[in-house]
Amino acid sequence: MLAVLAVGGCSSMSKTECLATDWRSVGYEDGVAGYPGDRIAYHRKACAKQGVRADLTAYQEGRSQGLKEYCQPANGYRLGENGATYRGVCPANLERQFLPAFEEGHELYTLRARVTDTDSRLAYKRRELDRVKHGIVANSADVVSDESTKEDRADALVDTAELAERAGRIKEEIRQLERDKVRYQRDLEDYLARQPQAM
């Protein structure tokens, strides 16, 4: 509990809590979470208000141990796949394997995001096209309505022509997005075929 309070950098920590904090555990938790080295500043500030100094040596030892877990290639891949940000915290000897795995995972994240984004854009464009079609139908009703004036009919015809032109543009955008989606989906499937661990 004390370690959790310290990790949060909570300025409301009591003097007793600061004195009882296991700084090695705090450092370990920060390392496992991939926090940069200046994270200790939050903890030091919290306890400085209580007149207690953080144990920097114990913190750094703990963080070093935590980073050994964080900087494993499997974790790097998982972080990249989830779209996480890598803050460059891994020591050079661990980063050599961690970074390529992170980048592979991030590639998967990017490929999936392209498909999802294209799906969203397609759905939006299809809704937009439906609204335009409804507008054309409404204008057609105005044109044939006995209650419409000559001016109303003229306005409806002009508006219909503009809506028809807009519908044509939207249809072309939809066709392009559908082509993009096929390409993006193929790229994603090709990636998954090359990376069985991503399945």
Image: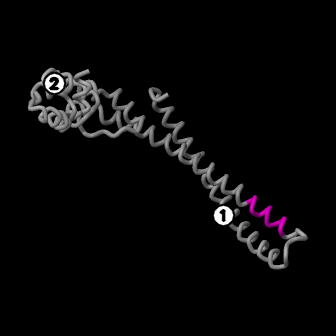
Q: Is residue 5 visible?
A: yes
> Which label's residue is closer to the chain start, 1 or 2?
2
Q: Are marks 1 and 2 in contact (CB under 8 Å)?
A: no
Residue 51 horizontal side relative to residue 145, left or right? left
* Residue 135, magenta (yes or no): yes
How dense is the environment of label 2, judged by Cα within 10 Å: few (below 14), some, or many (20 and up)? many
What numbered label is drawn on residue 23?
A: 2
Q: Residue furthest bottom?
A: 151
**Given the image, on which type of amino acid does mark 1 rest?**
Arg
Quadrant location of the N terminus in the rendered image: top left
Whole-percent x and y of residue 165? 70, 68
Q: Is residue 41 above or below residue 134?
A: above
Whole-percent x and y of residue 20? 15, 20
**Given the image, on which type of amino acid does mark 2 rest?**
Trp
Q: Nearer the viewer, mark 1 or mark 2?
A: 2
For the record, the magenta segment spans 133-142
Please state which of residues 14 and 81 is positioned toward the viewer in this rendering.
14
Measured Cα–Cα span from mark 1 to mark 2: 62 Å
